[in-house]
Amino acid sequence: MRRRDPDPAPGRRPEAAFEDTQAMLAAQARSERSPGSGSGGRSRRGRAGRAVAAEDTVVSGGPGGPGGRGPGGRGPGDGDGDGDAEPGRRGWKRFIPNWKIVLASFTVLAAGIFGMIAVAYAGIPVPSDEDMQASADDRGSVIYYGDNKTPIARLGVKRTPVTIKQIPDHVEDAVIALENKTFREDSGIDFAGIARSVWSTATGAQLQGASTITQQMARNYYEGLSQEVSIKRKIKEIFVAVKISKTLPKDEILRRYLNTIYFGRSAYGIQAAAKAFFGKNVTQLTPPEAAYLAGRIQNPSNFDTLEKSGKFAATKERYTIALKNMAEMNPGAYAKYAAAPFEDLKFKKVKVTEINRGLKGYMLNIVFKELSSKYGIDQEALETQGLKVYTTFDEKMMKDAQKVVQARTANLDPTIHASIASVDPKRGRVVAFYSGDDFINDYNNRAFEAPKQAASAFKPYVLAAWLEAGYSLKSYVDGVSTIKMPGTTPIKNSHTAPYGPIDMVKAMADSVNTVFAQMGEKVGLENVAKIATEAGVGEEAKKNPAYGGKNAVDWAVEHQKYLTTIGVASVTPVEQAAGYSIFANQGKHIPWHTVTKVIDVNGLVIVKEPTAERQVILPESAADAIVALQAVVKSGTGTYANLGTRPVAGKTGTNNDYKDAWFVGFTPQLVTAVGMSKDVPYNKPYGKPGRRVLKVDKYGLPNRKIKNVYWDEEPMPSFIGGGGTPTQIWHDYMALATAKDKVEQFPPRADAGTQNNLATPRPTPSPTPTPDPFGTEDPGDDGIPEDLGDQQPLPDDQGCLPGDITCDSTGDDTGDTGFPDESGDGGDIGSNGGAPAAVAPDPRARPSGQRP
């Protein structure tokens, strides 16, 4: 008999406790097998559910009893693995999340996105003027003539900022009506436009515009907002626009916008646009004109292209829409303009100008180089910083120089070139020059960049060294016909008859080679070179690799010895004009320059004119040198330079076979150098088989398409010797250039130094007539002595003179160039087929000799 448990619960069968225990054990076993159980095999929810189910089964007493399969058997939660499933959720439906879960997830995601946007918005600072794009206030620069008011050229961005008060209401309204009607009320963005932009980008189309005026201003004004097409940039632009709208007044936003937006015709800003399209200030624009300019904002470059080809339909359509929108915005003010004919607009004629055309290109070329090399002002600065550059050039003198050269060379071969350079001796200013007629087609700036042998025009520096050594003009030297100096080939005079002992004045007037060679030996070539180089002579040749970076005079002293005294060193017209300034300016030299000052957009002077001067020779030496140089004009080789009552001093120069010819002369107020040479293009280098001369155009240049051009310097007609055409050009030009100058006298002769005779002077001759050593019985001879004293024979194998850096060139451009593109057609300066490039033949070639 089974023992009863003590104290059974009232009303329960004695077997109930056992059954409960069994049910609990069975439920635990099923829970351990459940896939949803934890590490201990139990799931709280499964355990409870299964216990209840087991109990219900036992209590029901259905068939099969505990563990049976009848109505009291297994049901949901009976251990078949579906104890957690909701009733009726079977198969794929069980994977669909509960709507409550979806709603909660969406809420969390949205909160995260808006949180990120809020963080991004907060992280973008309010832009300030310091964040302005470098190009937002770009302005072009103006280059002025020496009168400080006449423009030579304007270049770069056209922009003239104006205040909001200077912009008429109808101009503001025209832009607002066409670009952003809600500008005055919106928060800086257009949600409808943004939606279109997002949609077009998402679908792969081009990013739509739909930007407000505030957005456009932000994009064009502030750094970091590029013009790229991307969602990232657009979002940042929106954030910046909203912040700007909250921090800046609408008028300020509109002012910045109208001063930065591009309208076409290179005009940035409303003031520049008013000038470019209608030739008037923004304050004078009419409502129809304002409507037209507002219409151009949409696609200015495309409208430029269309209008240039005579197609105005697109801009007319925009103009019509602008007037319509203006009338809708303010009928009282603009309704009367709604039908204003497009054809009534009076546009300013478009002038397609090339700033490098004509004489201007030569001026700009040298100014740009000076700004870059001396002051670090490059092309970008000139195009964007709104600088005012004041030059030294006199417009009338520039044109006079051109006119005179054209007249004197009209019948000459186009390969013969004449160059002029005029310098104010007291200030170093290059007041005028001539290098050619059109820089685009003939872009060799010869007055500055084409060194030629100085020939006898170098002899004044030898005389200066003589005087500085303490020797006087009264000293005598033997004018022998030929002399052999140490380390130098024999030096001859142009005339076989010896002069005998002559003083310095006579030696200069007749340009006697052998006298100057002896003077150079007496004072030392290094002292001659010192004076010449301190006067700025020979510097351009440093750019020629053949000189190894040395000044042409120093190189000549080292390699050509006493031939230096008769002018084998290569010089430019501007160097000679500035060099002779030491005589006209009491021995002082100021380096030549073409820029007097540069003023920035704020009115500050950022470049000042150089005024530092160097005392190269004593005033007494300069005064005595002038006496000898005046004799050249009064009775020597340069009589064509005589200007009547106006005092003139100068020196001629002619090298072998009339290949280079010079006259460098001056009045007390102005020094001018004139040089001439003949540069001939060939298809092959000198001495090569099949070599032939290339056909040239009116500028003396061959076809620009020819890849390899070789330049040789060749003889000119004999009448172009230094005392001929160069002196005549100098005379005609200086007569015009000095016409309004006061007639001033040179300082009186100082007679400084002591007499140092290198030859015994002859007794004073009797007053009987003596024959002119330069005279001739030829009835065609005018009796004017030629400057042939520095001519020496040219070796048969030498097609170019030593040191001539415009000769026998392959066209390589080794020097820097002025900007912008000097060629006008995209070519490089000195490119093959162009003007003679700054590349020299071997300067070691044996130098000159007398005329055959």
Image (cartoon, grey):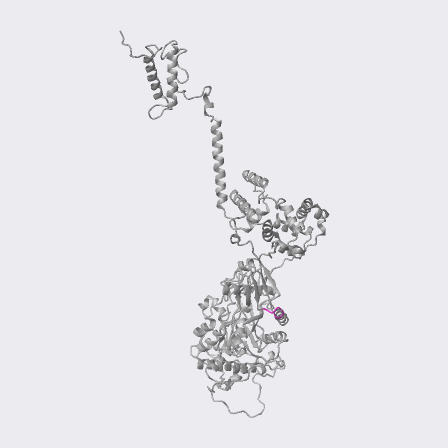
Which percent across, then down, holds residue 230? 52, 43
Would you say residue 241 sits in the magenta stretch?
no
Span shown in magenta: 393-397
Of all residues, the one furthest to the bottom in this rendering is 766
Q: Nearer the viewer, residue 629 or 207?
A: 207
**Horizontal side of residue 841 vs 778, given as left or right:** left
Q: Which quadrant of the figure has residue 731?
A: bottom right
**Horizontal side of residue 251 vs 40, given as left or right:** right
Which percent across, then down, holds residue 237? 54, 45
Which percent across, then down, holds residue 270? 62, 53
Would you say residue 396 sits in the magenta stretch?
yes
Q: Which quarter of the image is occupied by the N terminus?
A: top left
Q: Which of 133 and 372 is in front in this view?
A: 133
For the question of whether residue 309 can be seen, the reply is no
For the question of whether residue 189 can be seen, the reply is yes
- Secondary structure mostly taken by the magenta-highlighted segment of the chain: helix
Counting the numbered discs, the total is 0
